[in-house]
C-alpha cells in the first residue's frame, strides 16, 4: 500500500472531487491493491489472478471515502498518457 502523506485537493478527469456528505474538498490518499480471482474455477493460465489498483480518498472533515480505479488518458498537448487523477497538496500556514 502506498500512502501520500499530507492533505490533497483531488481532480478526477479535470473535475474537482467534493465530498458527497459535507461538501469538503480536502482528502487523505492511499492506494489499495485487490487480487481478482475467478469464482469456483480451477486455476489455469487463462484465469490467473489479476491485481486491481484503486486510489482511495478519505475526507478530512467527515471521514467518508471514495475509491477510483487508476487509469490513464492520452494528453494531446503533452503527447503522452497521463493519470486521470491529479493531486494538489494543501499547505496550512
Image (cartoon, helix red, strand yellow):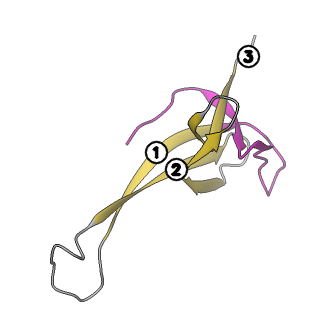
Residue that carries the numbered disc 2 in the rendered image: 70
Q: Which mark is residue 92?
A: 3
Q: State the image coordinates of residue 11 (x, y, percent, origin top left).
A: 72, 40
Upstream in sequence: badge 3 or badge 2:
2
Q: Quadrant of the N terminus?
A: top left
Question: Marks 2 and 1: CB-CB under 8 Å?
Answer: yes
Q: In front: mark 3 or mark 1?
A: 1
Q: Quadrant of the C terminus?
A: top right
Disc 1, SS:
strand
The residue under the point 58% across, 26% down is 6
The magenta segment is 1-27
Residue sticking out furthest to the top: 93
Disc 3, SS:
loop
Upstream in sequence: badge 2 or badge 1:
1
* Residue 22 magenta-highlighted: yes
Separation of marks 3 and 2 at Cα, in angstroms: 28 Å
Q: Which mark is residue 83?
A: none
* Quadrant of res 49: bottom left
Q: State the image coordinates of residue 56 (x, y, percent, origin top left).
A: 55, 49
The residue under the point 76% across, 42% down is 14
The residue under the point 30% across, 85% down is 39
Question: Marks 3 and 1: CB-CB under 8 Å?
Answer: no
* Residue 77 magenta-highlighted: no
Amino acid at each position: 500500500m502506498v500512502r501520500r502523506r499530507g492533505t490533497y485537493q483531488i481532480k478526477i478527469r479535470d473535475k474537482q472531487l467534493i465530498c458527497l456528505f459535507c461538501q469538503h474538498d480536502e482528502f487523505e490518499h492511499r492506494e489499495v491493491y485487490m487480487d481478482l480471482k475467478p469464482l469456483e474455477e480451477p486455476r489455469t493460465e487463462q484465469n490467473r489472478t489479476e491485481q486491481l489498483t484503486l486510489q482511495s480518498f478519505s475526507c478530512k472533515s467527515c471521514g467518508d471515502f471514495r475509491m477510483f480505479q487508476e487509469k490513464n488518458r492520452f494528453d494531446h498537448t503533452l503527447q503522452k498518457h497521463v493519470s486521470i487523477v491529479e493531486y494538489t497538496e494543501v499547505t496550512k500556514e
